[in-house]
Image (cartoon, rainbow, N blue to C red):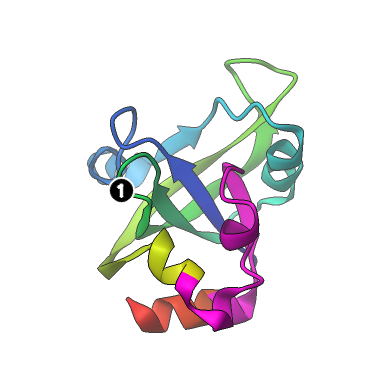
Amino acid sequence: MAYWLLKSEPDSFSWADQVARGAKGEPWTGVRNHQAKNFLKQMAIGDLAFFYHTGDEKQIVGVVEVIKDSYPDPTDLAWFAVDIVAREPLKKPISLATMKADPALADLALVKSPRLSVQPVSDLHWHYLQSKS
């Protein structure tokens, strides 16, 4: 199993929207960055990802699970998508400012490349962040 972080503008698609999709989940489509595309191609059923609100919030708010392996994005077949389902909200959201201020997270992709919409999260960072929520 691998760990990831998926970013979404809450005004467009929020954690509440993801939860509302229920067990059928939601296709994660529309990613148009080559590095993020390569990460989507690596995702597999059972992988977990932090759901991150961008915009004014800038915080991890929940955990989703990949329920369908990477496939061509139906909105543009040159790109890739995965299907995800909400698993659980974080007990306490973790802000980007908090992550940037924590030396233990200096190598976290979100801290180093905050603009990338799909990012890997190491096992160490995943468990550390889970312990902080």
Q: Quadrant of the N terminus?
A: bottom right
Relative vertical location of residue 12 with respect to residue 83 in this rendering, above or below? above
18 on left or right of 123: left
Q: Identify which residue is drawn at 41% across, 52% down.
A: 51
120 on left or right of 84: right
Question: What residue does disc 1 label?
Answer: 57
Q: Position of residue 46 (x, y in %)?
A: 56, 61
Q: How many marks?
A: 1
Q: Position of residue 114 (x, y in %)?
A: 56, 50
Q: Identify which residue is drawn at 31% across, 42% down.
A: 56
Q: Can see residue 85?
A: yes
Q: Identify which residue is drawn at 36% across, 39% down.
A: 55
Q: Nearer the viewer, residue 24 or 5?
A: 5
Q: Position of residue 102 (x, y in %)?
A: 49, 78
Relative vertical location of residue 62 with respect to residue 56 in this rendering, above or below? below
Q: Amino acid at mark 1?
A: Glu
123 part of magenta stretch: yes
> Farthest residue in the top direction?
76
Q: Can see residue 47?
A: no
Relative vertical location of residue 41 with respect to residue 88 in this rendering, above or below? above
Q: Quadrant of the C terminus?
A: bottom left
Numbered range of the magenta stretch: 101-125
112 part of magenta stretch: yes
Q: Nearer the viewer, residue 87 or 58?
A: 58
Q: Identify which residue is drawn at 39% across, 84% down.
A: 131
SS for tag 1? loop
